[in-house]
Every structure is written in C-alpha cells, then in structure tokens.
Amino acid sequence: MIILTLVLASSFLFLIRSPPLYSRVERSRPFKAALVDEVSTTNPDPYLVANVTNTLTRIGYTVDYYGPTDVTIDLFKNLPSRGYGIIILRNHSTGLTGDVIALVTSEPFDFGKYVREQQAGLVVEARLGSSNTTYFGISPTFVREAMQGTFPNTVLVVTGCAGLANSEMAQAFVARGAEVYVSWDQIVLANQSDGGAILLIQSMTTGHRVDDAVTSATENAPSSPLYSSQLRYYPLDKGAVVLNLRV
Amino acid sequence: MAKLGYLAVALSIFLVLSITPGPLLEPIVPKIPRAQAITDTITLRGFALSGWNGSTSPNPTITVHAFDTVKLSISSADTAPHQFLLDVDRDGSEAADCPATDPCSAQVPPSTIYSFSVGGISAGSYTYYCSFHPTTMLGSFVVAPDFSINANPSTLSIPTGSFGTSQLTLSSNGFSGTVSLSSTVVPGTPTITTTLKPPSVTLNPGGLGTSTLNVTTTPFTPLGTYSVNVTGTSGALSHSTQVTVTVTSGTIGGTATPNPHGLTLPLIGLATTITIATGLTGLYIRRARKKRIPQA
C-alpha cells in the first residue's frame, strides 16, 4: 500500500509538471496561413491585414484572419493542430521589464477561469498600458504543455515587442513543431513592427531565405526614434528556410 | 473798405472749399465700384455732402461673397460724424437696428476698422448708409451667391496603417451648382492617401451637401502632423478647409503577472491526496496488526 501511495503521488506530480508526450512529425509545410490579430484591439492596421493577405494569397496560401474577438486561450490551445504553414502572431507581448514572458490574448482576465493553468503558470494576467482591463496571456509553459497537436514545420512570425529578447518563447514553439520563429529583440512600435512584418512576408514570398528576409526587413522597416529593435530568428541554424511557393 | 472786400473774398473761398466734394480737396481718393472682401480692406471715407468716398452719383457699390468677412477702414474726411450701417432688414437707416439686426461700425472720427461677417446674411442686394447722413451717404452692398465648406472633426489622430474620416459639409448661400472636391496632403507623402466620397456635391440655394474625407496611412507613414487641404471648386468660386492629421504609433507590449491571486488548488489537491493516502496507510497498518495479534 505504501508503494501504491508513492506511485499515486509521483504520478500526480508528474502530471502537473511534465510536458505532454508528442512526437515531431516531419511533413511538408501546408499552404495555409493564419494572421492572429490581437493588437488590432489597440492598434488596428487594416493596411497590414490587406497587404499580408494579398501577398500570401498570390503565392497560393489560404489565409485565415483571427480578429480580436477570436484570440482566446482556446484558439492558442488548438493552434498547432489547425495545420498552418505560416502563422503571424500580431499579439502584444510581455516580459519587457523583467516580468513574465507571455503573448497576450484578447480574452479578458478572470481569476475564476483557467484556475489550474493560472496556478501552474501556463496563463498569466496581462495588462496593456494603464488600462484597467486585463487579459489572459499565454506563457512559454502553456506552449509546451497546454497546446494540443504539433505545428507542421510552421514559420512563425511574432510581431509583438521583444518576442526574441530571449529565446524562451521561441524554444517552446520550436519544441511544439514550429520550424523557425521570427520576432523582435527589443521593444518595438506598431508601425515598425507592422512595416517589418510586411517586408518580411514580401521577401519570403519572393523566394528569399529567412535570414535574408530578416535582414532586409530590419533594414527597411520604419525606424523608431526611441528603440533600436531588430528582427531575429530562432533557431539560428534555420536561416536557410524558404517558403514553398505554389505559383 | 478794400480790406473788408479782401476779407469777404477770403471767407467766400473758405466756405466754398469747406463744402466742395472730396475729389477737389483730395483728388486721389480711391473709387471702389466692386470690392472683394476676402483679402482686401475696403476704405470708406465719409463726406456729408458728397457721399462715401466723395462719389454721390452713385456711392461705391460694395460686392462681397456670402460667408466673407468684410473689413472696413472708415474715416471722416470732412470732420463731420459718420457711422457705417448695413441695412440688412431693409427698413432704411434705422439706427435702432444697430447692431442687433444691422451691422454697424463705431462712430468716426476717430478713424476705425470695422470687421463683420456676412455669413448670416442671405445673398442679395442691400443698402449701406451713414446713419448720420442717410440721404447723401448710401450705396449698394451686394452679397453674391457662394458656398462654404467645413470639416468635422477638423483634427484626426490616426495610428499608422489605419484610417480616419472627417465629414465635409458644404452650405449654399444663394448658390446653385455642382462643387468639385479635391484634396492635398502637406507635407506630401505617398504613404498617406485620401479619398472623397462623393467627389462632387450639388447644392441648391440655401441647401446643404456632405462628402466624407477618408485619410489612410500605412505602417511606413512617418510619424508626425500633416495638413489635408480640401478644396471645393465651382467655376470661379473656390473655397478650402483644412483637416489636421496626426499620425501616431504605440508600443505593442504589456506587463504580466503570473498567478495574481495566489491560487493554490493543486497544492491543496496534493495535500488532500497525501492526507488520504496517509490515512489509508494507517488503516492498513492497524488492520494488519489486528490480524497478527490473534495469531500470536
């Protein structure tokens, strides 16, 4: 009976902390793209939406747009299994001032919701500016442990601030199946971020490698008088990744 | 006697000169048969006997366009008191209407500058007077048909990559016709585009028309302040209004708090599990001991 108890307790602890078991499957990148646009809550950019959608459509991708009301914990939970070859996450992000790194959703924070996830640090309470409204944010642990399915060698572009200030979030997405993760290394203004995203996608959809596209987009994106943020990619050995073009 | 004769002649000359019209005294007094009041100041010099600017036949005709602001520089050329009065209600030079109904200047001398808007005056022909000398100092004041254009709001704050709209309202004062609208951005940049829907508005006399100005920016629009000048043109008539556009951008970051309410349900669950397990273990041991005692 003592052994049984120990086994039960160990199993319980294991279930709380261990990452889910999934296998990385090598498969071709689907011609499906997603634009997840939580930032439009505060900084709508219909120009970016139209531009990116047209650019990707031209090379044979179908593009799903997720507006603010769609960007929920559930969306992120199921995102890997939706089979997107390229995902642009236009989300606010946190972790700029030593706080927890997270991608912000547009689902209002409720301490009575996702209780287990809150306690386990999978989701956090995120605040934008001095607003009284707070939202759920997902942490790298959420990507590792709560997401379902695997990304099909997805190219992930995270346009929020400092998505690659460190590689914690990038590692989590790559562990979840993303092939390459592109983001900014510091705080970034919306115009710089959106301009960079447009240039990056334009470059990649004309056959350029990730490393070239990142360099070009950083150089030509609108500059900021306040921040010298640069686009980066992770892992560093994936600079040669190119988008497969149907047209 | 001769001295008296010289004195009489001198006095006669003085009297003649004092009642002689201005042109003899000041031959360079300008005539203003038509005046555009938008930019030019209209000068009116009062002569009790010979009319405004010394031209009784007729007094100068002043023509302005509806919505203009008229600026008059009024002085007395004969030292007599004068006061400009525009007879909007067409009941003559009734000073009692001044200034509530009829726009009127301060009394001169001393010289004065008097400005008033004709925006509220219907297009048409009116008479202007000197309220002190209404029989000699009166002339035509014509408010020509025109239109105006206004923007609401007149300032827009637009994030990069987004757009803003302002409603343009065109008002007619006696004007009838089609007004074509156009817009320019200052300083010019290809990253700001403007559209006007509809691009032209047809106005009836006294009527209103609207058009919507849409200003679109891109992520590549340099942050800063721009002017969008909207011009309405119909034949020789042209009017403009300005919309100030501020292009903004913000950071796309936030701050996060993990487990802000210190929720501990899993810990409680773990503690409960351990307690139950410990209890069950205790029961098992007690049972096992009880079983062993009879055997002993």
Image (tube, helix red, strand yellow):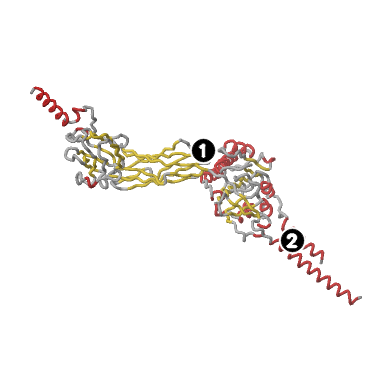
Local packing at callout 1 (Cα closer than 10 Å; few below 14, some 14-19, many 20+) is: some
Label 2: chain?
A
Name which quarter of the figure residue A10 lies in.
Answer: bottom right
Q: How many marks?
A: 2
Q: Is residue B184 left or right of residue A182?
A: left
> In the image, is residue B174 above or below residue A134?
above
**Do tag 2 and tag 1 residues touch (Cβ < 8 Å)?**
no
Name which quarter of the figure residue B40 lies in.
Answer: top left
Residue bearing the label numbered 1 = B222
Which of the two residues, A73 or A125, is positioned nearer the viewer here? A125
Residue for point 62% across, 40% down: A231
Q: Quadrant for the N terminus of chain B, please.
A: top left
Query: Disc 2 marks which amino acid?
Result: Phe
Label 1: chain?
B
Residue B16 locus on image (x, y percent): 14, 29
Residue A225 locus on image (x, y percent): 56, 38
> In the image, is residue B78 above or below residue B149?
above
Residue for point 51% across, 46% down: A46
Measured in 3D between alpha carbons, the distance from the residue under mark 2 to the one under mark 1, in whole angstroms, is 56 Å
Residue B204 locus on image (x, y percent): 29, 46
Query: Disc 1 marks which amino acid?
Result: Pro
Residue A91 locus on image (x, y percent): 59, 48
Name which quarter of the figure residue A110 lies in.
Answer: bottom right
Residue bearing the label numbered 2 = A12
Query: Is there any visible trace of residue A247 in the rendered image?
Result: no
Q: Quadrant for the C terminus of chain B, please.
A: bottom right
- Which callout, 2 or 1, points to the residue nearer the camera? 1
Which of the two residues, A143 or B252, is positioned nearer the viewer here? B252
